[in-house]
Image (cartoon, grey):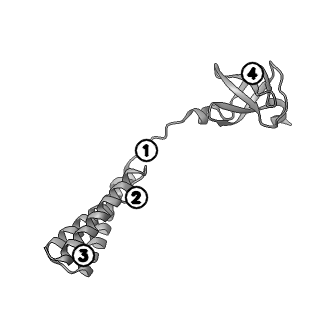
Amino acid sequence: MEPLLSTCLFIWGTLTVIFIILEMNTVALVSIWFVVGALAAMVAAAQGMSFLNQNFVFVGVSVFSFLVTRPFVRSLKIKIIPTNSDEIVGAEGVVLTEVDNVRAQGRVMINNIDWAAKSTAGTVIPEGVVVRVDRLEGVTVFVTRKSEHEA
């Protein structure tokens, strides 16, 4: 095998692997068309085409595969599944154990689930007070007294 041919095969093979890895690490189709184009360019290299023509094959096949598959990809309906944070942020709950950031304590009952809690404003929130969740960080909710939201 002549050096130029093996170099071109190596280049297109490497690009194919890179595009596959890139595609595997994303949740959207971003490089699958380049995989097809790089494979086509590899075939063109094996057929003895010049490197310039291999690049034309790569671009042409990539664009063609994009145009052919794009309507199908756009028609896919992706269902968005709400996460715990989507449900909990904005929800109301009751303080079970006084929320005190300085003493690193606080428990809140939200939707029948006991959560570790911190005060968003850093103020102490006594037991029995109704609170609203401002944000969720890990397994800790940051809450504010409901009356503070209404003010």
Q: Disc 1 designates what residue?
A: 78
Label 3 environment density (alpha carbons within 10 Å; few <14, some 14–19, many ≥20):
many
**Do tag 2 and tag 3 residues touch (Cβ < 8 Å)?**
no
Q: Quadrant of residue 77?
A: top left
Disc 2 versus disc 3: distance between alpha carbons? 22 Å
Q: Amino acid at mark 2?
A: Val
Which numbered tag is attached to residue 143? none
As shown in the figure, which amino acid type bears the numbered disc 3? Gln
> Does label 3 or label 1 sit earlier along the sequence?
3
Q: Residues within 10 Å of mark 1 (few under 14, many from 20)?
A: few
* 113, above or below 46, in the image: above
Q: Earlier in the sequence, mark 1 or mark 2?
A: 2
User: Which label belongs to residue 54?
Assistant: 3
Residue drawn where x is 19% and y is 75% of the image: 5
Q: Which x, y percent locates residue 79?
A: 45, 41
Q: Amino acid at mark 1?
A: Ile
Q: Position of residue 44 (x, y in %)?
A: 19, 72
Single out the mark in the foreground, 3 or 1: 3
Q: Position of residue 42 (x, y in %)?
A: 21, 68
* Disc 4: which residue: 94
The N terminus appears in which quarter of the rendering?
A: bottom left
Q: Residue at coordinates 49% horizontally, 41% vertically from top-left?
A: 80
Counting residues from the start of the chain, the first of labels 4 and 2 encountered is 2
Whole-number angstrom distance, CA of label 3 to CA of label 1: 36 Å
- Give me the C-alpha separation between circle 4 and circle 3: 67 Å
Q: Is residue 136 left or right of residue 76?
A: right
Quarter of the image that includes the C terminus: top right
Whether pointer 4 and pointer 3 mark residues with C-beta atoms closer than 8 Å, the reply is: no
Could you say which disc has been placed on residue 30 in the image? 2
Characterize the local packing of mark 4: few (<14), some (14-19) or many (20 or more) Cα atoms within 10 angstroms.
many
